[in-house]
Amino acid sequence: MSIIIKGGTVVTASQSYQADVYCEGGVIKAIGKDLDVPSGAEVIDAGGQLVMPGGIDPHTHMQLPFMGTVASEDFFTGTAAGLAGGTTMIIDFVIPNPQQRIMDAYKQWREWSEKSCSSYSFHVAITWWDETVYQDMGTLVNEEGVNSFKHFMAYKNAIMADDEVLYNSFSRSLELGAMPTCHAENGELVFQLQKKLLAMGMTGPEAHPLSRPPAAEAEAANRAIKLADVIGVPLYLVHVSTQDALEEITRARSNGQRVYGECLAGHLMLDDSVYLDSNFERAAAHVMSPPFRSKHHQAALWKGLQSGNLQTTATDHCCFCAEQKAAGKDDFSLIPNGTAGIEDRMTVLWTHGVGTGKLTPEEFVAITSTNSAKIFNIHPRKGSIQVGADADIVIWDPEATKTISVKTHHQNIDFNIFEGMEVKGVPSHTISMGRLLYKDGELRAEKNTGTYIKRPAFRPIFSALDKIAKAKQPTPVKRS
Ligand code: URP
Ligand code: ZN
Ligand code: ZN
């Protein structure tokens, strides 16, 4: 199948220009003005529209077994919903149970993800430590194309990584040239606050944000950053939701530390008043961690994106329907944590980022696609419009509008946190590895057609870091 996109404006993270784009064999074959139409090529008229790299969502959880249930969105429905919203690649998470061999969990997730219909890849969570974990991290990096490891500093008595696990895994990541990533919340503090609130009779969703205060996030962010600094490894913090954690990142970066921050479309748009809704179902539908925060945090996150101290945007797409959320009817700490957004991230960020002047179209491309590709070492194969890159392309109509609704979304969940939001700027076509899979509202996704993307280790950055670490190495004092 070959496709030629005629008459659009190509927008990358660095420039915008008029050009046609020709895709063949899953890759971009030619870019230029007035390209001839090769015989048999499907022609897409992109006049008045923007031709951008498909979105990369670096944080999703399709069919995740979590908190006694399994996320309702599977790898097919989730990647299909992504395509409807202009996202052509996800990086999901393998999350082994403590004591489970991590290679076994990885194989299980690879099997589940075969039904995907776009590009996908995995971070692997380190939830415990022993010699097999050390070995399996090596196998994952050297043979399976995994270059990032995730650490949940929250979820005590489940998947929480303590400082010993963090130390060992960060050190091993440095050896391997892999990126450690963290969900930064002090899990012990959250656990104690949950117990205290429940004992006070606060059993409803309004207690959820009280059990996870901004300080719990800031402390964990700071701890992870300091551990990474001592060990000499880069660090990526997922779903940064507070001004406090952002300040930790900003300070570390200004000290020359290689720390990256991700924020979620949900945290940029919603505030913690959602937990005060008197309707349990609606309040519980917003329970995710870290929780939605008060408005000043949202303003700080936008500034974080504008200043470049936050580099990526994600969704943490993790769907639980009302009947699943009901598990926490009498105890907020049992409400499965997670909200959806893969289909809406791009349009919400365009509307509220580019539409308000906070971001340029090029910055939009950077924060929705290119920066994730760079940080996770798949650029320029992904996240770029250039000859030789995968033909992962979204054709964006900046004038088209729609109203986001659970009634029309493709996501497999009975709630939409952006319900009723009017957006301007939506995808008209989404192309995944050269296949036109979304066209003017029609989704043509098919199961088992996606591609697992290997991500190589980060040798150049890490060898530079190694030099710095060696220069700092202590020498023993000679004593007689
Ligand atoms: O509430 C959330 N975020 N659920 C998914 C697991 C995680 O913490 O990322
Ligand atoms: Zn998390
Ligand atoms: Zn997550």
Image (spheres, rainbow, N blue to C red):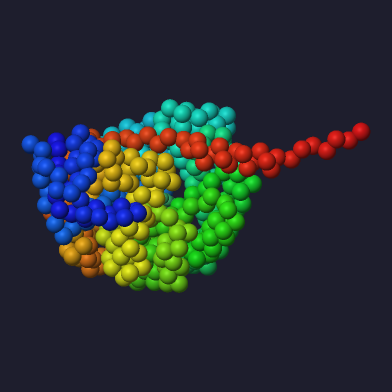
Residue 311 left/right relative to 89: right
Eyeballing the image, is 26 above or below 31?
A: above
Decide which of 149, 209 is in the foreground and name it.
149
Q: Is residue 348 visible?
A: no
Residue 66 left/right relative to 181: left
Q: Residue at x 70, y 40 (%)?
A: 473
Q: Where's the N terminus, which quadrant? A: top left
Query: Where's residue 324, x and y in %?
Result: 33, 53
Q: Residue at x 21, y 54 (%)?
A: 18
Query: Where's residue 151, x and y in %?
Result: 50, 45
- Which quadrant would residue 106 be assigned to in this image? top left
Residue 57 left/right relative to 255: left
Q: Residue at x 61, y 48 (%)?
A: 229
Q: Is residue 470 visible?
A: yes
Eyeballing the image, is 354 above or below 412?
A: below
Residue occupying the far right of the picture: 480
Q: Residue at x 15, y 44 (%)?
A: 35
Q: Where's the C terminus, which quadrant? A: top right
- Which quadrant would residue 436 be assigned to in this image? top left
